[in-house]
Amino acid sequence: MTSWHYVYRVKSTLRLPFTGGRHILEAQPQPTTRGCLLPFDSNRVWVAGEDQSLHETCGVIGVYAPGLDVAQAAFYGLYALQHRGQESAGIATATGERIHCYTNMGLVSQAFRESDLQRLEGHIAIGHTRYSTTGSTHIRNAQPLLARSDGLELALAHNGNVINAQELRAELAEQGFSFASSTDSEVIAQLLAYAPGLGWAEKVGYLMRRLQGAYSLTVLTKDTLLGIRDPRGVRPLCLGRLNGGWIIASESCALDHLGGQYLRDVEPGETIVIDRDGLRSIPYPGERPKAAPCIFEHIYFARPDSLLEGKLTYLTRQEMGRQLAREHPVEADLVMGVPDSATAAAVGYAQESRIPYTEGLVKNRYVGRTFIQPDQRIRDLGVRLKFNPLPEVIGGKRVVVVDDSIVRGTTTPQVVGLLRKAGATEVHMRVCAPPIRYPCHFGVDMASKRELIAANMSLEEIRRFIGADSLGYLSVEGLLKTAGGEQGKTFCAACFTGQYPIPVQLEMDKLALERP
C-alpha cells in the first residue's frame, strides 16, 4: 500500500511570501517513498504514523570550497559523523544566488542517492545527521532547516538543545510567526533570520543574548558560511582547511576522512564567518561565562580518533581506564572492554593493573547503540543481537569488564549473563564514568531521572541487579582530572552532579514544542 507523504510547497519557487512573519504554504498530497529535494522555500515533508524514538545527539558540518563538489564532501563528512545521530540526514548548498536543500529519514548512506547529491549545486554546503533531543522523529524535523526574512535567507544545522525554546517560540508565535517543525532548531533559525543589526556581529550577538542552552551551528546564506558555538561551548565544533577552502564540523574525524587539516576548536561564544573575502572570527560580545563543554563527549559520544580541544579522545579514554584501575583494583585474570566505546579505557585499565587485555565479546557493528532504541522490548532484543562472547577465551577466567557508562541498566545485566554463560568464573564490572543520576538538558536525550538506574538504586543494589561480583565507578574527581581538570579546564558534568551550568527545570519534555 502506498503511504501518503504531505509535501508542503511554497506558492513562489523563488521567494517565500510573508504576512506578519507567517509562511504562506500550500499543501499537496503526493505518493512518494523518499525524501524531498526542492528549492530553498519548499523542502517540508510531513509523514504520518512514524515511530517516535529517543536518541542521543547530532552531527553538523559546513564546507566552503569553490571548485570542490561540496555536496559530496558534506555527504562523506556526515558519514564520518554517523555515530552522532541515526534518525535523519540532510544537506543544503548555496550557489551564490540561491539555496538548495535535501533531507531524508534514515542513515546517511540510506538518505542520499547519487542523483540527489548531483542536484545540490554550489560552492558552500552544510549538513546534519540527527538524533532527536527536542521534537519527535519525523521528516519535518530533519535538518538543515530553512528560514527567510525580507533581507536574509538561510539554512541552519544545529547540535545541542535550547532550554528556553518553548518561551521563545511562544513569543514568536504572538508576533505572527508559524513553524513547520517541532524543534528548537527552527526557533534558532527564525531568530537569526530576523535578528536586528547591520552585520553578523550584531545579528549573532542578538541571537546569543536570546538563547539559553547548548548550540553548535553551521549556517549558510546564498554566499556565506557561518560556524557558531554557544558561550559555554557545551557541544564541540572545530575548524579546518580543505582543498584550499574551509571546513567546520562537530568532530575532527570528519576532516580526516575528507583529507582536511584540523586547525583548532571553535572557541565558546565564537562565530566563524567565511565568504569570498576569506575567514574572519567574531569573538563573544561581552564577558564570556565559564566554559562548560560536555564531559560525556570525552567518555562516549566523540569518536576515539577525534580531537577534543586538541587532545586525541582515545588517549583521554585510556587515561580514564588507568585512573579507574587506581581507584578500583581487583584480582583477575583478564581485562576486556565492552566494544567499541570502552575499548580504550579497558586498554588503560589493563596497562595500569598489569592484567592481560583481551577481547571477550565480538560486536555486531550493524546493530545500533542500544540505550537509544525506542522502547524496552527493542532494547532487550538489541543487546542479544549485539554481542557474542568468546567462551574459549574467557572460560574459567576471572574477568574485569570495562564499560563506558551504565544508563538505564538494560544492557549490563545481559552482558554479565552472557559472560557467565560463556564460562567466566567471576565478572567484575568497572565503569569509566561516575554514576549517572541526573538527565541532560543540553543535547543528550539519554533518559529521564526515573529511568536512570543510579538515581534510583544504591551501588550495592546496582551490583546485585546487574549480577556482577563487584562494581566500581570512576569518581567525578578522577574523571575531571583525566579530561584536563588539572590544567584548569572546566566541564559540564551535571549528569553526575546535578550542578547544571544554566538553571533548568528538573524535568523537561522533548515533545513540548509539538503541543499547541
Image: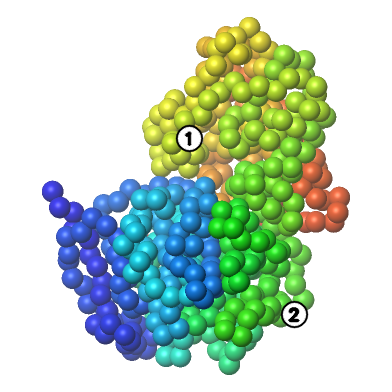
- Is the residue 289 above or below the residue 16 in the image? above
- Is the residue 138 above or below the residue 174 in the image? above
Residue shown at the point (27%, 57%) measured from the top left: 34
Q: Disc 1 residue type?
A: Arg
Q: Is residue 412 visible?
A: yes
x then y, percent, for residue 205: 64, 81
Q: Which of 493 and 218 is in front in this view?
A: 218
Q: Which of 479 and 316 is in front in this view?
A: 316
x then y, percent, for residue 245: 59, 72
x then y, percent, for residue 37: 31, 68
Outermost residue on the bottom side: it is 198
Real-space Cα separation, disc 1 to disc 2, in angstroms: 46 Å
* Mark linked to residue 286: 2
Q: In which quarter of the image is the C terminus?
A: bottom left
Q: In this view, does 199 lie to the left or right of 143?
A: right
Q: In this view, does 181 lie to the left or right of 30?
A: right
Q: Label 1: which residue?
A: 365
Indicate which label's residue lies in the foreground, 1 or 2: 1
- Say which element carries label 1: loop
Q: How many labels does the image show?
A: 2
* Mark linked to residue 42: none
Q: Quadrant of residue 475?
A: top right
Q: Is residue 85 visible?
A: no
Q: Disc 2 residue type?
A: Gly
- Say which element carries label 2: loop
x then y, percent, for residue 5: 22, 60
Q: Reading the chain from its start, which is encountered first: label 1 or label 2?
A: 2
Residue shown at the point (53%, 52%) measured from the top left: 80
Crowding around mark 2 (Cα neighbors within 10 Å: few <14, some 14 to 19, many 20+) is: few
Q: Which of 102 and 325 is in front in this view?
A: 102
Crowding around mark 1 (Cα neighbors within 10 Å: few <14, some 14 to 19, many 20+) is: few
